[in-house]
Amino acid sequence: MAKKGMVETNKRRMRLAKKFAGKRARLKEIADDQSRSMEERFQARLKLAELPRNAAPTRIRNRCAVTGRPRAYYRKLKLSRIALRDLGSRGQIPGLVKSSW
């Protein structure tokens, strides 16, 4: 199980990223638009830099929904390999069969 603080930090980052997504997109669009003046694009970059760092979507870490484990994460299921195997062994994931030979 991951530390609760790390899981909560990640949740906070998700909330911030969602909150500032629209503003970030508008500022990035202005900053990347070559038809605008250099000063206007520079001002957009400065405003983008003023946004909280944790509002950037790249700072969000994919974590297992059950354990909070950050590695060996299956995006489709939102689970780590260990949690997937455990739930599969118990028969709680439909269609998943643990192989044995």
Image: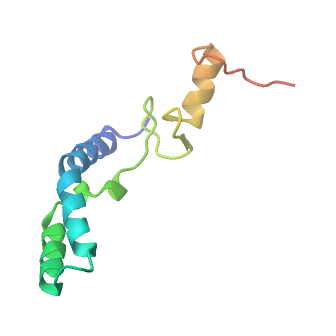
* 38 lies above or below 60: below
Near-viewer residue (48 or 61): 48
- For residue 93, which quarter of the picture? top right
Residue 73, image x and y in percent?
53, 42
* 80 lies above or below 18: above
- Give the residue displayed 21% in from the left and 48% down from the top: 16
Residue 95, image x and y in percent?
66, 18
* 39 lies above or below 53: below
- Give the residue displayed 18% in from the left and 70% down from the top: 49
- For residue 30, which quarter of the picture? bottom left
Instruction: Report the residue that reaches farthest toward the front.
Output: 35
- Give the residue displayed 61% in from the left and 16% down from the top: 94
Instruction: Report the residue that reaches farthest toward the right.
Output: 101
Quadrant containing the C terminus is top right
Instruction: Report the residue that reaches farthest toward the top.
Output: 91
Instruction: Report the residue that reaches farthest toward the bottom.
Output: 38
Quadrant containing the N terminus is top left
